[in-house]
Image (cartoon, rainbow, N blue to C red):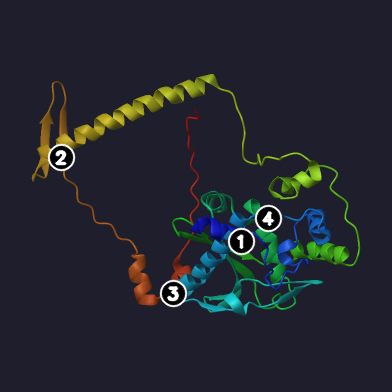
Amino acid sequence: MLAEAVIASYENQESDGYHKGQLTVTGVSPCAYATYINYKHLDDEGFDAESRLRMKNGQWQELEILEDLRHAGFTLKYTGSNQLMVNVGPIRGKPDGLIVVDSKEDLLEIKSMSLNMYTELKQKGLRETFPGYYNQVQLYMASKELRDRVSGCWFYAKHKDTCRPYDIFVPKDLTYSGPIIEAVTKIVSGGTIDKPQAIIPLCTRCRHKLFCWKVELLDTSGIGVVYSKEAVNLWLQGQFHLDMGKEFNEEARVLLKQALGDNDVVYCQGEDSLLQVRKITQHRSEVDISKFVQTFGAHRLPEVMTEKIVEQVRVTLKE
C-alpha cells in the first residue's frame, strides 16, 4: 500500500519554477532541428511517476557528488540552490557550478549514471558518447558570464550502484558553440529549421528519432560483423583447453603449496618430470594514494595523476 501511495503522489508534473515550458540550455541540441522541435513543443516528452522518481533520485545523488568533492578539499561555487544563471545568446541556463582545481577556476558539470552510461563514458569519452552533454557544457562556457572566466569544464560522473567516480576535463571550444548559438538565435527570433534530408549520426541518440523518421534507430557505431569459421573454431578449442588447464593448474598449486611448507625451495618429482617450487617475496615501490591525500590533500591529486589508455581485445561467446 505504501509503494502504491508513493507512485500516485508523483503522477502529476510539478514545475520547478525555472523551466516553465521555455527553452533553456538543456533543451538545445547539436542538431538545430531537434532544438526547433523542443522550442515549438512538437514532440514533448511525457514522464510517468517512476521516471520522476528516477530523476529525483539522480538529483539526490548529484548532491552527494557535491559533498564528496567538498570532502576531498575542493572549493566549489554556485552549486545546489545557489546555482548561477547564465545567458547564452537569447536563452538562459543554470550550470551545476564552478570548481577550483590547481588554483584555477573552471566549470563543473555532474551526472549520476547507470552502469551502461558510465562504462560508455569511460570507453569512448564525452563528445562521442553523450553529444547532448558535451553541447550543454560548451554552451555554458560560451555564456556572457563564463566565456572569459573559465577555460574548460570538469565533467564528473558517479556510477549509481557502486558510487565509483570518474571525471573528464573538457576544454572550451567557442568554434563549436558559436554556430549552435546562431541557430538558437534564429529559432527564438521566429525562424524555421528544416529537418535533415537523411538520418545523421546524432539521430541514433536523439529522443525525437521516432518523431522525425517513424522508425527505431540502433547505434551501430563501433560494431562490425565478420565471417570466419576457422577463427571461431580455433577460439572455441583454445578456450576449452585454457579453461581446463586453468582448473588443473589451480588444483596443482594447492598441492604444491602444501608440499613447499616452510621451505624456500622444494623439488617435486613426477613420473618423468621434475618441478622446482620456490617461495618468492618481492618488494615494489608505489605511491600510496591514501597517504598522499593525508599528507598533501585530495585536491592536489590532479597535479600528479595521469591517465593511461590501454586497448584490449575481449572475446565472448554469444549463445
Q: Earlier in the sequence, mark 4 or mark 2?
A: 4
**Is label 2 in contact with label 3 (beta carbons under 8 Å)?**
no
Separation of marks 2 and 1 at Cα, in angstroms: 60 Å
Q: Please report whichever mark, 2 or 1, sits nearer to the chain's N-terminal start.
A: 1
* Residue kind at label 4, given as amino acid type: Pro
Residue in the image at 44% along x and 74% along y? 71
Tell me: 277 left or right of 45.
left
Q: Nearer the observer, disc 4 or disc 2? A: 4
Dot 2 amino acid type: Lys
Which quadrant of the figure has residue 190?
bottom right
- Outermost residue on the left side: it is 262
Labelled disc at residue 131: 4
Q: Give residue 257's mark.
A: 2
Q: Nearer the viewer, mark 3 or mark 1?
A: 1
The residue depicted at 77 percent of the width and 66 percent of the height is 21
State the residue position of label 3.
71
Task: Report the Cα–Cα distance between label 4 and label 2.
Answer: 54 Å
Crowding at label 1, few (<14), some or many (≥20) Cα neighbours within 10 Å?
some
Secondary structure found at label 1: loop
Mark 2 vs mark 3: in front = 3
> Disc 4 and disc 3: Cα gap in Å?
30 Å
Q: Give the mark nearest the N terminus, 2 or 3.
A: 3
Do callouts 4 and 3 mark residues in contact (Cβ within 8 Å)?
no
**Label drawn at residue 10:** 1
